[in-house]
Image (cartoon, helix red, strand yellow):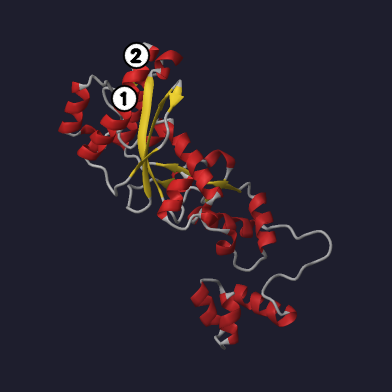
Amino acid sequence: MGIFYLLRTHHTIREIAVLVGLNKSTVQNIKARIDDYGSPLPHRQIGRPLKINERTKRHLKRIIREDPFASFKEINVFVSIETLRSYVDRLDFKSYRAAHKPRLTARHRKSRLHWAKEHLNWTEDQWRSVVWSDESRFCVEGSKRGKRVLRKEEERYDERNIIFAVKWDGGGAMVWEYFWGGDFVPLEIIDTSSVDQETYINIYANKFHPWFTNVTAHQKRDFIFQEDGASCHTGGYARWWKETHQIRGFEYWPAQSPDLNPIEHVWNALERRIERERSSIKNLEQLKVAL
């Protein structure tokens, strides 16, 4: 603990209080515990535990609200982890896996709501005729998908408890996947650090189009191909190629809306698989094999 070290290096109570951001009486109490028991942690008492007072509740709640992603070790100041967990539980906070969502503006929200209302009354069979697709990136060193947050049960999607999605920052393995309500295809690993229109359409023509032609004829369905608004999907060459080959998509797809695509469940399942094998993944090739 920092206070223990500062006391050992002969700092005054006032100096320590300023350095660690506590009041002098708190530092004095910690010093007294060190003097009496040789430890800054509260002395374990036999019998009924002390009740948490209102002042402590307010202080702890404020700490959690300021940084809900802090671990118990990070927010602990002068009580044991066991005691801290008990206090947090009494405040109705629990540790959950954090939700991952894109950062949305008012314009994004309006567009997403409009799209949802337009498709509100679609039948199950109509949804089965959508071919869902997307790219994703998986990293050798892991991701933030497993990060935990202290929150109340009903606060999953409060902004302060969300990890906002960011654009790819390079590294790792990029993959492409697509599926519809009756079938899915093996994952396509893209051997490039970025995808432009030419790369996308080459994969599209060699992998997707033969499958799409076959499944359309076999199922006797008019499929809708879903893709987001990435420039490699919507550029002039990409649009021309898809129109030429009679591949129809949605009229539009709302920006910042990967969570509207059920393929997100595929990425989550893959991430869980990777995390189970994380200790054996040391390089990019091992990551690709795991995928």
**Taking 276 as reference, is 101 left or right?**
left
Residue closer to the observer: 243 or 155 = 243
- Answer with the quarter of the image where residue 48 lies: bottom right
Residue closer to the observer: 144 or 171 = 171
Answer yes or no: is residue 162 visible: no
**Taking 60 as reference, is 179 left or right?**
left
Mark sitting on residue 217: 2
Residue closer to the observer: 290 or 144 = 290
Is tag 1's residue or tag 2's residue first in the polypeptide sequence?
Answer: 1
Give how far across and how far down residue 13 sits, in percent.
57, 82
User: Which residue is found at the position 73% from the left and 57% from the top?
Assistant: 51
Residue extending farthest to the top is 220
* Circle 1: element type: helix
- Residue wearing tag 1: 210
Residue closer to the observer: 280 or 33 = 280
How many other residues sit within 10 Å of disc 1, few (<14), some (14-19) or many (≥20)?
A: few
